[in-house]
Amino acid sequence: MSVAILQQGDYLIASIQSDLNDKQVLELREELADLVGKSRVRGIVIDVAALDVIDSFVARSLRSIVQTAKLRGAETVIVGIQPDVAIAMVQFRLNLGQLRVTLDLDEALALLDRLTRRDAGDGR
Amino acid sequence: MAGEVRVAINADADLVDARAEGRAMAERLGFPRPDPTLIATAISEVARNIVVHVGRGEILLRPIEETNRFGLVVIARDEGAGIRDLEGALREEYSGRGGLGLGLSGARRLMDEFEIESTADTGTTVTMKKWRPRDELARLREERRRRE
């Protein structure tokens, strides 16, 4: 399997295991949108450390995953963008939009804790 | 040509191979970080253009040698109907099917040279090059060896 998805409490953790083709990227979006409802999670972490290349399609797909999850009631944090990939994305001028990004899983979970607690607090 | 690698592009799964071959060749030739990643990303974009707009084509990867520098050439070739508005296709705001503009203009920024030829009869050929200065010590040693 190219993406391992496991649930930890209120969150889903999706670890991409290898370079993905376009079809697998789109499948990931559908699977996460389904799982958010089925598993009643409030947050998603997507680990992209295994991706050697993030091109315009993958960047667009990540944005689309984030927006889809949001409409299903979950926040998404991207974790583990490789240093060379980050440089390529900047030089490419890829638009990351409102992607939330952290360096590692612990930070991602802490960020989700903050995001989902605030959402629960004042109902915004 | 010696060292040339050809990757047939018929489906989006072929992009994974094209990226991996490009990265492998860049590393083999001695490109420093982050160049192999920049090259693989540019290959991904031009290969995707083939898949999205034409359906089939090929990527050729070729090492180039000059006295003071070495490089890698990426040629993306298809026999499709050509790109009608080339200038527009290279502008960032252009959004053809599948977002042609962002892909091509982004690939151009990742590489050192970028040329595109497109006609309705012969299809589209994108030629991109990435250069690196040759290591000066290695070059002098090689010259001396040649003289001896």
Image (tube, helix red, strand yellow):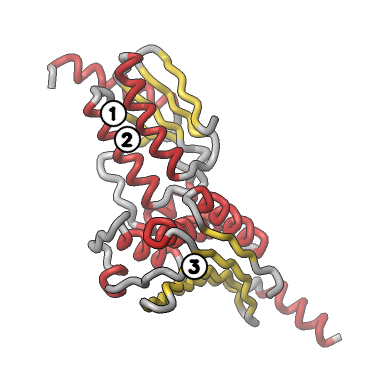
Q: Quadrant location of residue B72?
A: bottom right
Amino acid type shown at disc 2: Ile
Callouts 3 and 2 on one subunit: no
Q: Position of residue B112 (x, y in %)?
A: 46, 71
- The label nearer to you, 3 versus 2, is 3
Left or right placement of residue B119 versus residue B7 in this view: left
Q: How many marks?
A: 3
Q: State yes or no: discs 3 and 1 in contact (Cβ < 8 Å).
A: no
- Give the image location of residue A14, x and y in percent: 44, 27
Q: Say the numbered circle drawn on residue A69.
A: 1
Seen in the picture, residue B95 relative to A71 is either above or below; the reply is below
Residue A35: x and y in percent read 36, 21
CA gap between label 3 and label 1 equals 36 Å
Q: Which residue is mark 2?
A: A65
**In this figure, which residue is indicated by the disc labeled 3?**
B76
Residue at mark 2 to residue at mark 1: CA–CA distance: 6 Å
On the image, which quarter does residue B5 sit in?
bottom right
Say which of marks 3 and 1 sits in front.
Answer: 3
Viewer-closest of A13 and B5: B5
Disc 1 on helix, strand or loop? helix
- The quadrant of the picture occupied by the C terminus of chain A is top left
At a point 80% along the width and 82% down the height, the residue shown is: B144
Please give the name of the residue rendered at 36% of the width and 46% of the height, measured from the top-left corner: A59
* Disc 2 to disc 1: CB gap under 8 Å: yes
Q: Label 3 marks which chain's residue? A: B
